[in-house]
Image (cartoon, helix red, strand yellow):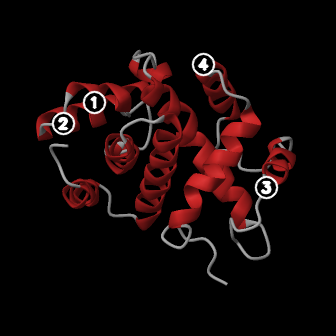
Amino acid sequence: MKFTREESIEFFREHNKDEMYMRHALAVESAMRHFAKLYGEDEELWGRVGLLHDIDWETTQSVEAGHPVKGGEMLRERGYDEDFVRAVLAHGWEFSGVEPRSRMEKTLYTIDELTGFVTAVALVRPGKSLRDLEARSVKKKWKDKAFARGVNREVIERGASIMGEPLDFLIENTIAGLKPVEREIGLGAD
């Protein structure tokens, strides 16, 4: 890997000062590493792609302002490999026009939104923790369209379909993938 995790975090922080964005980056990084391990893929690469997938978010804050295309440009300028850049572009497939093809791209496309939803569910639980969170609790909140309105459930469902994985499997493994960074992402503070 051309850039260390520390260099990647520094690069992210150069462009994203809000701690909320860092927490999301760490959540997606951890979930991507978990799925990479599960699939026998490169955990470092997948994790780094998860960490930097929203490198441009604080600058753009919308697809109308160029997300994730601007992020792809930033990564290219910094010297990240084209496969890395393509994965970041594919996580915003509908806006970048880059359809997720590789397992890494499909996973990032799906997990980006799903980490946000799982985190939102954990935040409304008494301990604000992932410790005893189960997929069925997440699925129960899934049906409540007023809950976590900002999470695009259609993207997650489309992602599950292109990954060829059941939603329950993805939820269970996203929970598992987030547990190692629970404190770092603002959960489990009790």
Locate residue 90, reporting x and y percent: 42, 25
Whether residue 91 appears in this view of the structure is: no
Q: Choose the circle earlier in sequence order: 2 or 1.
A: 2
Q: Which residue shows up at 53% across the image and 64% down it?
A: 180
The quadrant in which residue 85 appears is top left
Which is more toward the observer, 56 or 32? 32
Amino acid type indicated by mark 4 = Ile
> Quick check: 41 left or right of 161?
left
- The residue to which callout 1 is attached is 85
Q: CA distance from mark 3 to mark 4?
A: 24 Å
* Mark 2 crowdedness (10 Å alpha carbons): few <14, some 14-19, many ≥20: some
* Mark 3 crowdedness (10 Å alpha carbons): few <14, some 14-19, many ≥20: some
Q: Are dots 2 and 1 in contact, CB under 8 Å? A: yes
Q: Which residue shows up at 70% across the image and 47% down it?
A: 172
- The residue to which callout 4 is attached is 162
Provide the secondary structure element on which disc 2 rests: loop
Provide the secondary structure element on which disc 4 rests: helix
